[in-house]
Image (cartoon, grey):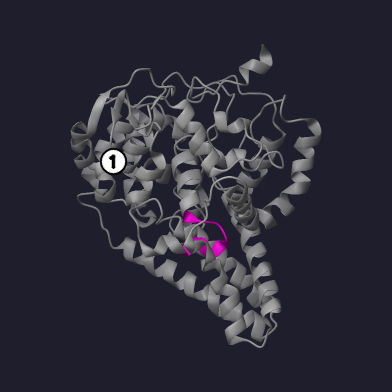
Amino acid sequence: MVIETWKQSGIATKFPTYRNSKLITTKGWLLGKQKDDEAEGLWRIYDGIYDFTEFINKHPGGEFWLIESKGTDITEAFEAHHISKGPHKLLQKYKVRDAKKPRIYTLTLHEDGFYKTLRERVRETLKTIDTTPKKKSDLIHLSLFVSIFIFAVLSARLNSILCLALAGTALCWTTIVAHNYFHRRDNWRMYTFNMSMMNFCSWRISHALSHHIYPNSYLDLELSMFEPFVCWIPNPYIKSKMMRYLSIITEPLTYCIAFPLQKATRIIYSLRYNNIMYWHDILSLSIPLAIFLFSDLSLLLSLRQWIFITMIASFAFCVIGLNAAHHDPEIYHEGDAAREDRDWGLFQVDTIIDRGDLKGSQFLVLTHFGDHILHHLFPTLDHGILPQLYPVLYETLDQFKGKLRECNHLEHMLGQHMQLLRTTPNTKPQGS
């Protein structure tokens, strides 16, 4: 009976089908969600079934979101990605019928609840904010993107370890900043994410539709993909003592190969099952091509140089990303006691401790996943304008007994490793 308890999700009435697969992929996650979500082969929002087939080509955010999410419950994703009232008014036009079965998700989005109250206040605030920081975000992104090639070529021409490290750092930061753009409608900047060997289409699923909507739960792909090498869920039945301590040793290696491992996983899935590769998967090859064309290195040595740069970037990305906000013994993880108020927005707050040491620097916020709570609540907004939303966030948190928690990067790293060792669920709910 105890083990069966761990087969239940804290935010859903079903244990996710995809987690029973030997090879965890974004495609497997979507297929599992289609089986679990009671969306009847179309799109489900709350207790309604909608047919957006005719709207796919008209969707302002791009076709991808609707094509990939067909057959699933998109309630939380729909609410989080549409701040304005326009999309909500369009829904009735595409409604087919009421759903035959109740939703499997237990989180709520009541009109008078935390998230919708906050979103209404944010909607009003956006009418008067300064939008010029968006241009600064664009400039930071472009500068980092160009610097990848500059330092990559210099590392080869000068045989410089320093330039090699700077190229890896620039690649890491470009990847993180590009994440600022793929939550939105289609744009050219999202393609720069692919310089990392990862793919923004895959990450729109694993990050935007999975992790952002269901953080630290069984439905969070960004937890599942690291298992069994790294496991943050405090489950004594799947996290043995050896796994707990061994994960600390295997961490550096896992960090170094995270980028190429995601590419390899997608290639293997494409060969064994269905193709999930895209033409823009080849964009990362522009780095070794630039090294080959503008240095004296052979093609083979140019590829080796690129691999070193990618491994540096991968390691730095994981050090930043996995210690950015979500893992600490005080943060809610699957199996912990949940707060009584099941509001989706409060759930987001409970799964995050922000990096307080990044505030005040738009560059650091962009390159280190800063202002994380606001980004999770309103992912389509540019990071540059998020700081202007803190007054209404604090106001709404006070009203609904939520709390914005902060710490520095070192404290996050220590907390993340403590979470790797934790096997006992927290019995005290967040906000109690």
Please tell me which residue lies in front, 189 or 342: 189
- The residue depicted at 56 percent of the width and 79 percent of the height is 290
Please tell me which residue lies in front, 340 or 30: 30
**Left or right of 191: which side holds 115?**
left
- The residue depicted at 59 percent of the width and 53 percent of the height is 320
Establish if 330 lies above or below 132: above
Q: Callout 1: few (<14), some (14-19), or many (20+) C-alpha neighbours within 10 Å?
A: some
Picture quadrant where residue 45 is located: top left
Q: Is residue 327 visible?
A: no
**Left or right of 26: which side holds 141?**
left
What segment is highlighted magenta in the picture? 192-200
Query: Where residue 24 sits: x, y (%)?
Result: 61, 40
Secondary structure that dominates the magenta span:
helix
- The residue depicted at 47 percent of the width and 55 percent of the height is 200
Query: Where residue 134 sits: x, y (%)?
Result: 33, 61
Establish if 118 lies above or below 375: above
Report the residue that reaches farthest toward the bottom.
296
Amino acid, disc 1: Thr
Q: Secondary structure at mark 1?
A: helix
Q: Which residue is mark 1?
A: 53
**Left or right of 116: which side holds 236?**
right
